[in-house]
Amino acid sequence: MKQPVILIALLAAGTASAADGPTFDAQRLSQHVKTLSSDAFEGRGPNTAGEEKTVAYLIEQFKAAGLKPGGDNKNGKRLWTQAVPLGRFEIKGPVQASVSLGGKAMPLQQGNEIAIRAAMNGQTSVAIKDAPLVFVGYGVRAPERNWDDFKGVDLKGKIAVVLINDPDFETGQGAFGGKAMTYYGRWTYKFEEMARQGAIGTMIVHETAPASYGWPTVKNSNTNVMFDIVRQEPQKSHAPLESWIQRDTAVAWFKQAGLNFDTLKKQAQTPAFKPVTLKGVTFSADYAVNAQTIVSQNVVARIEGSKNPKQTVIYSGHWDHLGVGAPDAKGDTIYNGAVDNGTGIAGMIELARAYGKAPKTRRSVVFLAVTAEEKGLLGSEYYASNPVFPLGKTVAMINMDALSPGGKARNFSISGSAKLDLLDRLIATAEKWNVSYTPDSKPEAGYFFRSDHFPMAKRGVPAISYGSGADLLEGGKAAGDKEKADYTAARYHQPADEWQAGWSFEGMTRDLQILYTLGRDLANSNDWPNWSVDSEFRGARDQSASERKGD
């Protein structure tokens, strides 16, 4: 049976469009990841020799690609970098921590039962003696949802014990939109809200499913050097103690207090929940903190637009990882970060190379490699707060974080379930390669709030974080899901996230063609994508509409 003429024409047009884009070299991608995640780069920790090597490598690659500096303006001359001042906080010496159960003190081992972060409120030492513990459910205060887990409780001088994720996580129904995580479910919100409530400390109860990662990730991400943006009043955002505890540890404490953890957890999933004191249970801790201010760097490269240079399309990704930390079972202390985010940075470098070889686009294109993502999206937060190029004239941000270095997939995803024109464009572009869109399979994990597009999104800039698909051409969805699960369990935020010679990078070569075409089409258009009318980010974008008139 012959196909309709119109369909044949559309298929031909799609094939031609796909073929028009550049090809990407899997071997070059592999070499970038191998270099960036080598032991010589020491895990790419901010404010280390690893940062110096990483920044130098990025600048070298962007220069070779024919790009120009797009960072800070110094005496009328653009630099390759944007200086990012950060607070650096590190626990010095041993951590003395214990819990008193019915008058009997029980020591707590740092990294085992508890993971205590270095204090980021300006204190150089933390000394807590027999502080009462109060269970505050999910620790949410959301007036717009008629939800208040605190009910007027006084948390001054007390430790707040709080659950991770949203009250809707287990039931999939309720005031927080069901399974998908809201910002109230993120650990960053929990720490900030407990500080606002006046607690002397926070203990987040770790459970793998609602956290979306295991205890090794918690340990490795929270017991090393901490960073934060420089704040005028840090104590308003950080209580002296910020920590996580193992679920089994918490259950034992609740039992000692005559409480049932699971029963209280179910109560916490309702708006009627009231805080509960763990009677007879107190917490003590003593440790020193080295606090200083350092300067890290975002790397910014640019191709100036030929017609509308003040309008900007941004490709982004974070160059940092966890640096050097606690040894794993094999004694390895370097957190190499091959997938996270060596892959995203490798992709950005090769995208820059492709743009450098092609004719200039009408709008400018910026390649933004940010620092301190692993410390709380700090480099992207700083850029969004101090943009080198106006946010109102930023067309879109396309973020790349932890792409799959394996084979091709039939689909792609983005972090979260946001509705925006940029996603519609990405879907249409991917269809030219017969790649379909699959919504975030774990919206409850809150990935939307965990990548560098978020600081731009909350300021109204249309922004997405691209995710590799799991429906593999070889092995299907079962193979792709297994690959992702294995990575999360065995390598994510662990020293084992290392380059592997067997990686084909074939999937990335095709994904980069899609992302190149998406960005280039935007950079050659007069269009301004927006959020859906019911998006929480639409208002911020609409407020800057006047900036987009004229040039």
Image: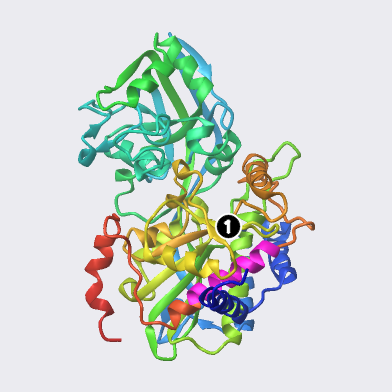
In percent of width and height, residue 312 lies at 41, 78
Residue in the picture at 42% in, 22% down: 283
Left of 362 or right of it: where is 56? Answer: right
Which residue occupies the foreground of this view, 242 or 96? 242
Question: Is residue 135 something one can see in this rendering?
Answer: no
Give the quadrant of residue 220: top right
Main secondary structure of the magenta stretch: helix
Question: Is residue 295 something one can see in this rendering?
Answer: yes
- Up the image or down, 460 lies above or below 259; here it is below
- Up the image or down, 386 lies above or below 261; here it is below
Residue in the picture at 55% in, 43% down: 221
Which residue occupies the foreground of this view, 84 or 272? 272
Give the quadrant of residue 28: bottom right
Crowding near the residue tagged with mark 1, few <14, some 14–19, many ≥20 C-alpha atoms within 10 Å: many
Which corner quadrant holds the C terminus? bottom left
- Up the image or down, 194 lies above or below 532; here it is above
In percent of width and height, residue 226 lies at 49, 48
Magenta stretch encompasses residue 516? yes
Magenta stretch encompasses residue 500? no
Q: Which portion, as a residue range, is magenta?
A: 506-519
Mark 1 residue type: Asn
Q: Look at the image and name its color scheme.
A: rainbow
In percent of width and height, residue 489 lies at 64, 39
In percent of width and height, residue 125 lies at 43, 38
Left of 499 or right of it: where is 439? Answer: left
Residue in the picture at 70% in, 57% down: 406
Which residue occupies the foreground of this view, 550 or 295? 550
Q: Secondary structure at mark 1?
A: strand
Q: Which residue is mark 1?
A: 411
